[in-house]
Amino acid sequence: MSDDIRFVPFRAADGGASLMLIAEQTLPGMPQDVFPFFSDALNLEQITPPWLRFRVLTPGPIELGEGTLIDYRLALHGVPLRWHTRITGWDPPHRFSDEQISGPYRVWKHLHTFERLDGGRTLARDRVEYRIRGGRVLQALAQRVLVERDLRAIFAYRRRRLAEIFPG
């Protein structure tokens, strides 16, 4: 199973310095086979580490499509947070995107893509443009001390859970 998590500096359209997290994982099945799992917002609870105490607050079932709003609750380092997102792009079974409307980041834009590979497999890719709150020095310190470590742990957990959910 191929997997990778990396962080890349990124200049946003507004000229601000952001970071891009890119996580990739090869899953068995074609995009049309794996996409339904990812398009069910309630499944986020299954692939988010228990230490985040993550819960979807929007009552299910949630009909995902462009413009859908979703509310979550989580605890980051013991601090309770609310997260409000909007689905900003919807192209099943190839991609969808969401953006934070309010939450812990200054910017969080998440693109999920599902690329068909040979042998009946799919490359699932997360591309997250994010910007931490605070000034440049605080952002750099937070990224180095907390955020990168946390995001690596979250996406590594997600990778392990997806390997269990999609064995093969």
Image: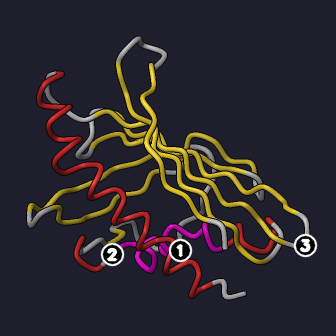
Where, by quadrant of the figure, is residue 125 drawn?
Answer: bottom right
Tell me, yes or no, whether the two marked residues, 3 and 1, touch with CB atoms within 8 Å: no
Q: Dividing the image into 4 quarters, which one contains the N terminus?
A: bottom right
Q: Which residue is mark 2?
A: 49
The C terminus lies in which quarter of the figure? bottom right
Q: Which residue is mark 1?
A: 61
Secondary structure beneath dot 2 equals: loop
Lower sequence index among marks 1 and 2: 2
Q: Quadrant of residue 164?
A: bottom right
Tell me if label 3 and label 2 are in contact, CB under 8 Å: no
Q: Nearer the viewer, residue 13 or 73?
A: 13
* Tag of residue 119: 3
What's the amino acid at mark 1? Answer: Pro
Q: Give me the residue at 16% from left, 41% from top.
A: 142
Q: Nearer the viewer, mark 3 or mark 1?
A: 3
Residue range corresponding to the magenta coloring: 37-48
Q: Residues within 10 Å of mark 1 (few under 14, many from 20)?
A: few
Q: CA distance from mark 3 to mark 1?
A: 33 Å
| Residue at screen point 90% across, 65% down | 118
Location of residue 71 in the rendering, given as x and y in whole percent from the top left corner: 35, 58
Amino acid of disc 3: Gly
